[in-house]
Image (tube, grey):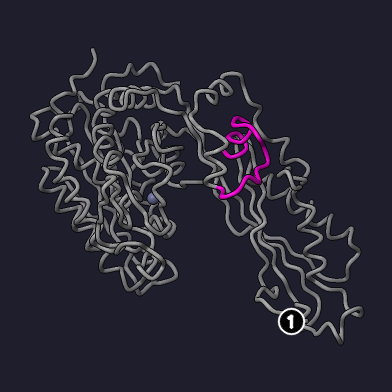
Amino acid sequence: MAPQLDGYFEQVDALSESFIERLRSAVAIPSVSADEARRPDVIRMSKFLVSELTKLGAHVESRELGPQPEKPHLQLPPVVIARYGSSTSKRTILVYGHYDVQPAGIEDGWATEPFSLSIDDKGRMYGRGSTDDKGPVLGWLNAIQAHKEAGVELPVNLLMCFEGMEEYGSEGLDDFIGKEAKSGGFFADADAVCISDNYWLGTEKPCLTYGLRGCNYYSVSVSGPGQDLHSGVFGGTAQEPMTDLVRVLGTLVDTNGKIQIPGINEMVAPVTDEERALYDPISYTMENLHESLGSTTTIHSEKEPTLMARWRMPSLSLHGIEGAFSQSGAKTVIPAKVTGKFSIRTVPDMESEKVNEYVYKYVDEQFKKLGSKNKCEVKLQHAGNWWVASPNHWNFSAAGKAVEKVFGVKPDLTREGGSIPVTLTFEQATGKNVLLLPMGSSTDAAHSINEKLDRRNYIEGTKLLGAYLHYVAEEPMSNGA
Ligand SMILES: [Zn+2]
């Protein structure tokens, strides 16, 4: 039986101005987690959520995470967890979002005050956190409110987990989720997880995201001389660390992005026919890419290999050289020690440990080939694993039906080239399927100046989150592929 959603949808429309006011109040709290001086505002934002959720009749707890690692004088902002409904005959859906935001200042080039929601005539609602991630977080609250006011029963039990440190590495969250997902914990009865904290591939068509790449980040240092040297005095007499480093870095990847380290590409899962079929319907063109790239200097000239290269193939990027002369001008320094930074975006079925092993071995060999008397050291800086879920799971099919109901189109099934580490944390801690169900669009400029959320994405997105809960309540459990 198709869920009856008309009453709910009408209520969302009727309440839309008050939902925008709710977002305005949230954006006005500059909850910047990276800025120590803003910590009281981050806490204030957590209290705002507690108060809104309490008013809606949810059971809410504000859980302390203790002092911030490396800044013990500073308390981490609390995780706001809430439960709405606890019927044993209903499914329980756990949703995640974050209430902290990236830093922002008008002096960075914003056209409007970043912490004051400003709506233009096209319905674009500008403000820091509008799309990342206050809009989606409030979307869940709006969905509860519209159900209540329409007199429509929420068809699932809703568990909520809203953190305040996402933009600063989610410190303390992994352990917390691990503990609460265990038997007796707050999230123990979750049947599936839904995260609304990413973006549509374009601006028109919603998507469901089922995969993320991981990232292994390395540094390679070359040193020799006891201090920086002058090329007029030592040029031609000393073996130069920078020369060695650049030659080693130059062997890692070619101009067309092919990783040269043996063993890496061999670990990549082959593309199946079933997977290939997911790409054709995706609404994306090379023009979209050229526009976001700001040039036409692409590796591939077709949509499918481009999306595959971004989502399901590994890539290696060179990021920078610490210790090198990088200002303008013509300084004749020979740097004594330079550290190159590069990372590999990882995909199924690459094993992080093996990637490290191959990288160390290869860098070592390449350096030895140079016959240099300098010293070379390669290190892993940090690693986060890739994630991929089955888009055939009932959690995804329910979300797909909700998208069709609200937007009248089948969603794109997408992956992302970047990582959202909390996704994997939830999957591992709960053992349940995790769905990424974005609200915002590709032009929202999260983390950038002039961040915005379109009114349509916010209001229809609120309908979508609510509709998803109805379809998820009805999907047959057997579809747990
Ligand atoms: Zn976010």
- Does the rendering let one see residue 177? yes
Vertical arrangement, residue 415 with respect to residue 116, above or below = above
Question: Among all residues in the image, which is located at the extreme top?
Answer: 1
The quadrant of the image that shows the N terminus is: top left
Q: Quadrant of residue 290?
A: top right
Q: Quadrant of the C terminus?
A: top left
Q: Quick check: is 305 in the magenta stretch? A: yes
Residue 260 appears in which quarter of the rendering? top right
Within 10 angstroms of label 1, few (less than 14), some, or many (20 or more) residues? few
Report whether 462 appears left or right of 145: right
Specify the amino acid type for callout 1.
Lys
Tell me where residue 376 appears, x and y as whole percent. 78, 66
On whether residue 148 falls in the magenta region, the answer is no
Nearest the eye: 181 or 171: 171
In the image, which residues are magenta? 293-310
Image location of residue 452, percent across then percent down: 34, 51
Residue tagged 1: 331
Q: Quick one: 21 or 400, which is closer to the camera?
A: 21
User: Residue sitting at 79 percent across and 51 percent down?
Assistant: 362
